[in-house]
Image (spheres, helix red, strand yellow):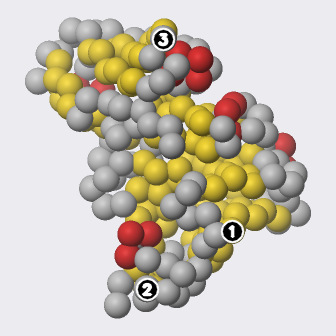
Amino acid sequence: SYEVTQPPAVSVSPGQTASITCSGDKLGDKYPRWYQQKPGQSPVLVIYQDGKRPSGIPERFSGSNSGNTATLTISGTQAIDEADYYCQAWDSTTVVFGGGTKLTVL
Amino acid sequence: EVQLLESGGGLEQPGGSLRLSCAVSGFTFSTYSMTWVRQAPGKGLEWVSGISGSGGNAYYADSVRGRFTISRDNSKNTLYLQMHSLRAEDTAVYYCAKSGGGDAPRYWYFDLWGRGTLVTVSS
């Protein structure tokens, strides 16, 4: 079965750029989506369809992908961005989530 | 107001059954595919099942195929998940989510989520 892999944790200083990666076979062809989840809350879509941001998502969130790796980039990271982030792809007729990355802003 | 409201969770014994519901308002329900995603305590997201807007196509994760059945009633704007042969590893918060992008999983992204309903499988 298809798998996508994320680092368990990433840390960043306020105001700096955070990069969260997601890896999988030919992931670049699968237009990975990204979700943010804060403790006790439901997930929120932040990136979809090759880098698009839903309404209400700040411009500091961007996505890119190429080959086997996708990257969620948060520019000028703020304390409110501290959360778990999940990438999502697909394989055949199923949906696959990465294991999640805990972003710490310190 | 757009809203997805899950219900039907609770405590069930191993081998038992539960039916989850997700009542939807604020968008044209029949136009969109819908999905169930679960999250075990302290763990990550796991896709469970999805269904096309018409209800004609249903998709399942290997972990639930043959035990769970997804369905929808477009006249009632409600999504369902019938769960049988429950196992301890099915314990999780179950979220319903609106699937943007089209009728097939390759296009799905989940742009609206409910608050979830907790299912606990334990004796």
Residue A20 seen by the camera: yes
Q: Are callouts 3 and 2 both on one chain?
A: no
B60 relative to A28, above or below = below
Task: Please name the residue shown 51% across and 61% down the image.
Answer: B63
Check disc 1 and give the amino acid type.
Thr
A58 relative to B121, above or below = above
A60 relative to B79, above or below = above
Check disc 3 and give the amino acid type.
Gly
Q: In which image quadrant can residue B60 be found?
A: bottom right
What crowding class fits label 2: few (fewer than 14 Cα within 10 Å), some (14-19), or many (20 or more)? Answer: some
Q: CA distance from mark 1 to mark 3?
A: 35 Å
Disc 1 or disc 3, which is closer to the eye? 3
The percent coordinates of residue B119 (x first, y second) are 45, 73
Q: Chain of mark 2?
A: B
Q: Are callouts 1 and 3 both on one chain?
A: no
Task: Please name the residue shown 51% across and 21% down the image.
Answer: A27
